[in-house]
Image: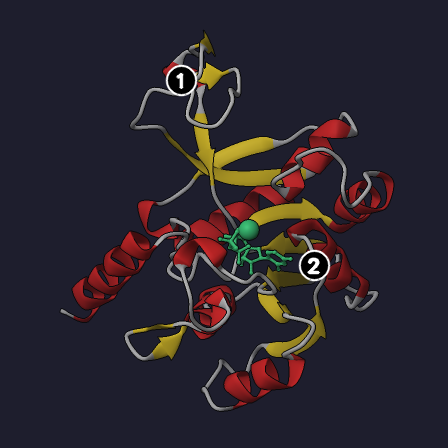
């Protein structure tokens, strides 16, 4: 079997604040996307990485990748993304060669995921799971609320039992046919599937959780950049 990783990197990074597209922002001098590609290529199983770039900056992304050394075991392709993460992932899937049968989907915004987490996901798919997500227990209690007018307090509807909740990360791993089917049946603007596994769930497919890692956190807000720099400094120490 042959495994590829699709890296959606076409987002703007609005929550990170003004600057370059998030995937091209640097961590310890190296673009986040380069860290993310290396994190996938670190797995011996991954022979192809498909980077999904902002549609108006495909050439810029290709240049950035060409300027940085990558594992020579791993081929890297760059394709143009779309308006939503889901659309970007679908465009990445469209670029996969025939002989790929396991697909990882990994956020460029999770540049520091350790290789053991990547390998754990791949192994679970190889062992027969159709869809695998790495995840961690939550630290915070979570409330479901009824959205209110801006400025008004939001009434709490429910408090799910925290011990049964998991915060989901990437790379998520899939049997290729399962993921492609989910992307062709669930519409691109289909209400709120915020991850690929959610689309498989909508089709009634089984999804399983394997252990995630705290270093697989998503760089979303400015404070996350501080944490990412600290993790890299600790790795160098
Ligand atoms: N993504 C993408 N195409 C989009 C939107 C998002 O490929 N149209 C990617 C992002 O580049 C990121 C991943 O999906 O690697 C997770 O999305 P998120 O963390 O929300 O990143 P952004 O959408 O860039 O950030 P924001 O929502 O703050 O604008
Ligand atoms: Mg987003």
> Which residue is tagged 1?
153
Q: Give the Cα separation between the discs numbered 2 and 1.
A: 35 Å
Query: How many marks overall?
Result: 2
Q: Which mark is residue 88?
A: 2
Pinpoint residue 113: horizontal percent, then vertical percent: 40, 56
Task: Provide the secondary structure element on which disc 1 rests.
Answer: loop
Q: Is residue 76 above or below residue 177?
A: below
22 vs 233, nearest the viewer: 22
Mark 2 near ligand 1 (CB under 8 Å)? yes
Q: Quadrant of residue 200?
A: top right
Q: Is residue 123 above or below residue 6?
A: above
Q: Quadrant of residue 226?
A: bottom left
Task: Provide the secondary structure element on which disc 2 rests.
Answer: helix
Does any portion of residue 128 appear in the rendered image?
A: no
Q: Which mark is residue 14?
A: none
Q: Tell me the crowding category of disc 2: few under 14, some 14 to 19, or many 20 or more residues within 10 angstroms, Cα based.
A: many
Marks 2 and 1 close (CB-CB < 8 Å): no
Pinpoint residue 205: horizontal percent, then vertical percent: 74, 29
Does any portion of residue 66 appear in the rendered image?
A: yes
């Amino acid at each position: 079997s042959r495994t590829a990783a699709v890296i959606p990197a076409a987002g703007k990074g609005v929550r990170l604040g003004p600057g370059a597209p998030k995937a091209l922002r640097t961590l310890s001098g190296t673009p986040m996307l380069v860290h993310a590609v290396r994190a996938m290529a670190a797995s011996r199983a991954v022979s192809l990485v498909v980077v999904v770039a902002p549609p108006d900056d495909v050439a810029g992304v290709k240049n950035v990748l060409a300027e940085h050394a990558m594992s020579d075991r791993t081929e890297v392709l760059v394709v143009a993304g779309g308006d939503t993460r889901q659309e970007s992932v679908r465009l990445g899937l469209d670029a996969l060669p025939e002989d790929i049968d396991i697909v990882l989907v990994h956020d460029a915004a999770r540049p520091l995921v350790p290789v053991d987490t990547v390998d754990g996901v791949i192994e679970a798919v190889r062992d027969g799971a159709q869809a695998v997500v790495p995840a961690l227990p939550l630290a915070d209690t979570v409330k479901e609320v009824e959205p209110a007018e801006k400025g008004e307090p939001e009434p709490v509807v429910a408090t799910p039992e925290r011990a049964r909740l998991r915060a989901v990360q990437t790379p998520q791993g899939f049997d290729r046919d399962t993921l492609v089917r989910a992307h062709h049946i669930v519409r691109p603007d289909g209400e709120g599937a915020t991850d690929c596994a959610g689309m498989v769930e909508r089709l009634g497919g089984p999804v399983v959780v394997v252990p995630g890692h705290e270093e697989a956190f998503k760089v979303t807000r400015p404070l996350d950049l501080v944490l990412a720099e600290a993790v890299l400094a600790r790795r160098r120490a």
